[in-house]
Image (cartoon, helix red, strand yellow):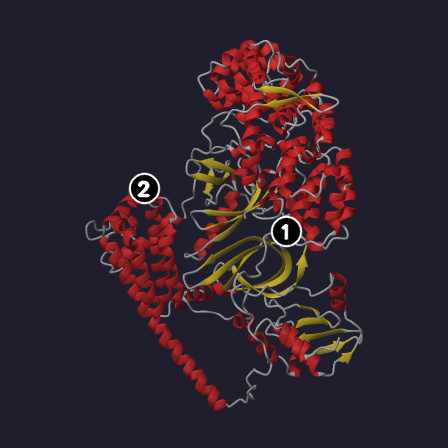
Amino acid sequence: MTLTLAQVEELAPDQGSLAAARALLAPAKWPVLAADGAGLVWGECQGSGSQPYRVMLAEADLGYKCTCPSRKFPCKHTLALMWMRAQGRPFATEERPGWVNDWLSRRRGGSARPKPAAPPDAPSAPRSIADLPEPVEQTVDPRLQARATAQRERSRAEREATILAGLEELDQWIADQLERGLAGFAPTASEQCRVIARRLVDAKAGGLASRLEQLPAALFSLPEHERTELLIERLGELHLIAEAYRRQSELAPPLRADVRLTVGWTMSRDELLDDPMALRCKRCWMVVASFSEIQPDKLRRIETWLTALDGDERAAVLIDFFPVSAGSVDSYAPGEAFEAELAFYPSAAPMRAIIAERSGPAVAERWPSPSLDLTSAIEHYESALAARPWLGPWPLAVRDVAVMRGPSGLHLTDARAGLALPIAPRDDQMLPLVGLQDIDAFGVWDGRRLQLSLAETSLGRWMAT
Amino acid sequence: MLAASAIESLTRSLMLGTTRQPLATTALDGAITAGDPKASLKALALLGQFQRFRRPVAQDLDAKPVISADQSRIIPEPVRPLLRALLTERAGEGRQVVTLAVADLMARRKLELHPFDLPLLEQFVKTHGALLGGSALAWAERNGTQDSETILSGALDESNWTLARPMQKAEFIAGLRARDPTRARQLIETAFAQERATDRLQLVSTLASNLSESDVPFLQLAAADRAPSVREAAEALLAALPGTPQSGKRLADCVACIKRGKSGVLRRRETLQIEFPATVQEESRRIQWANSMFGCIPLDALARALGLSPEKAVAAAADDPALLHVLLNQAARAQRYDLVASALQNAHELGRHAYAWMDGPDTRNAAAVEDWCSAVIHPDLWPEMPAGPTLYGIYQKTRAPLPDSVARAVLGCRAWRDFLNRSHGSASESIDKIVHTAVLIPSQLRNLLRRGLAPLPGYITERPLTVLSLLDQLEST
């Protein structure tokens, strides 16, 4: 089949993908571009990571694969390869390399990934190469560059000052609450938190604003007798973060980076991938939990928790955001396993990561038994909490535990140690676990409640739905 | 380390307000200097962090399992995904018959759901819990007020049956009644007074099986029960027993409303016809009235009272649909399926749809089910393949696939061949019909059914083939 530009337009998930693909048409971006003369085409495209992305295409049925971690199908690299092929650019005729043969041997026919369904209410937006703006020639003017750098520095300094002012306002607000007494906070919590959150957004401290926006819901999700403690912890934590930010020059680099991200500075994916100090781990990972929630800003936040199947039982969380209007999204399913290199955001207790490079799917018959019992796992949590005092949800992978019932609900227990972690209620799906002994379990602990998501038991695997 | 009193003091200050109750910063061991403008904030942060390091400890926890599954009977892992998929769908052609058939099959094979699937199959368990074993029953009743121990159905015996849940008790007694009618009645007699009305009714109803004169004394007591429903059920059973005052009176009333006549010119044959009260005129009401009036009378007793043999009584009722309904149901209860078969073959109109109006057989008696099907279901008389709901009615009466001979008759009849050959106007109706048919076909004939479906388009056969696959997997477990 001879590929045409019209087919490329048709396959593109959206106009943005076409634009991104066009930016990849420069020959310099493709150190390898080859074909076997029998309908298979492949290339290596240099991305922002150390390793180029490998892209392969079967022209007969337009099946394709790319090693980049993009969640769009086809990705910009695949579109660019198709585009160059449709344009008739020269491809070297070569023997198929091993990685292309591997892909071919695993193919089930058709595309490696199905095209995601269009959002139910949104008509399919037209994709057109002709509608793309003309690419602008990029020439480097040193004076303009210097001016831009200076401007960025001024903006950064202004933002720092704005944030510091916002932190003072936050401290004052908390102090006012303490003067009046926290006993009267709950009835007006929603309105109060909304107001101060808005002020923090204006002060460019969006991370702190989010924490305040979430506080009322977290408060009312607990029984009344626990709310006082939660309020003290959360408000205290806000002051801790503010104080740490003010003293960031005294902090070790990971904690300094952590507090800046917590307050609201962002680190782009490219910046993280380009950071030579960023922690990287290449492992076989298993998805052990997936949580989805819709935020007040109409973004769907998907948390995907991973544990490594080999090596050091490292855990990681991927956090993705999608517009609610996009409808259902292609997220990872619990139990799914894949090989990938993750890059962790800098932190005193690194946990949030992105996929730097994904090698391919893996098969995981059973989640390997964790090495830690509950006491050891809590000790690890406490170490992380000491390193990062505003620690958020933390993964606990534990062995030899049991689920028991108490007056206030279910608990994950290690009877020998006397520990009992309250489990976040989630209808009755965890009741069948009660009475089973020596369970291996995974859950996310927020200091008060455990979101239990996976258990390996004598009756097989249980997973939260 | 903060003392408990210090924590309490700090917390009280923060809750009441530092204006009203100043912070006792000395409790923080010098962590905060006096006069620090941010003393309250620091105290708040330190107290908060202190709380976060407190470990949650166990209090009043109970490890007693909610359910105790017999692991040897749990459905194997490979079957679970398909089972969950089919049983959790909210729509889908033939959904009702599929869930009932799966429940019946699990009961026959003594299979249990995997405990982890119970929360996902809540509605299925709620509807069919009695068929799914002790763990499903315990799950269905987990929020109930009964404090009884969970007893696996297989572990019930005469010493503990009264401790079981109501559905289990009825099942146990019904099973014992089939084997040892006297012993079953004795157990009922012992426990009767302590049971609730609904349970008493269920227990009385089990005596319909293997009813005999020895049951009369107990039934007469039950006929004086404080609950009207129990009294009614006992009276109906007494009326079915010859020699009781109830049966004598009922028989006399029945005979009184039958008009005898003669028909034919040359060969004057006896005819019987019911004379209905003036208030009962509509056809459907007539049949209902006749069933309630005659239903509990044995065929032999009625025929004798009329001075006829059962065969002649049935033949004489040929022109009265309502009376024929009643007599044929009486014949079926007496397991006189020969009479039923021959009468239906002579009455094509009634015979076509007899499965719809005939009372169902005792589903605990496989031989009775087989005889009923053979006598009542005549696919050769069907003008067209019955609709899904009608086929569901058949399944509800048999609660099992059809006997081999009847199932072959279904797959070989003209109505089925016509259905397969004609164009499929409404895909949904066609799928519904095929799913209902699939459930009625026994395992040894499923491949024959599959071959028959092969020429049909995939969107029609996908769902029925999935159902067949699940039934096959459950049968082979």
Residue A7 is situated, as x and y percent measured from the top left of the image, at: 67, 76
- Tally of numbered tags: 2
Would you name the residue on which mark 1 appears?
Answer: B428
**Above or below for B477 versus A351:** above
Place residue A202 in its image quadrant. Answer: bottom left
Badge 2 and badge 1 both on one subunit:
yes
Which SS class for mark 1? helix
Give above or below for B214 relative to B368.
above
| Element at label 2 | helix
Residue B75 placement, left or right of A165: right
Percent from the top left, x then y, of residue A366? 65, 47
**Relative side of A187 to A365, left or right:** left
Q: Tell me what residue is drawn at x 66 percent, y 83 percent.
A: A27
Q: Which residue is drawn at 37% across and 67% down?
A: A205
Q: Distance between the residues labelled 2 and 1?
A: 70 Å
Q: In this view, does B153 lie above or below B103?
A: above
Q: Which residue is drawn at 69% across and 21% down?
A: B335
- Identify the residue under disc 2: B4
Q: Residue A88 carries which label?
A: none
**Which residue is more in the foreground, A157 or B100?**
B100
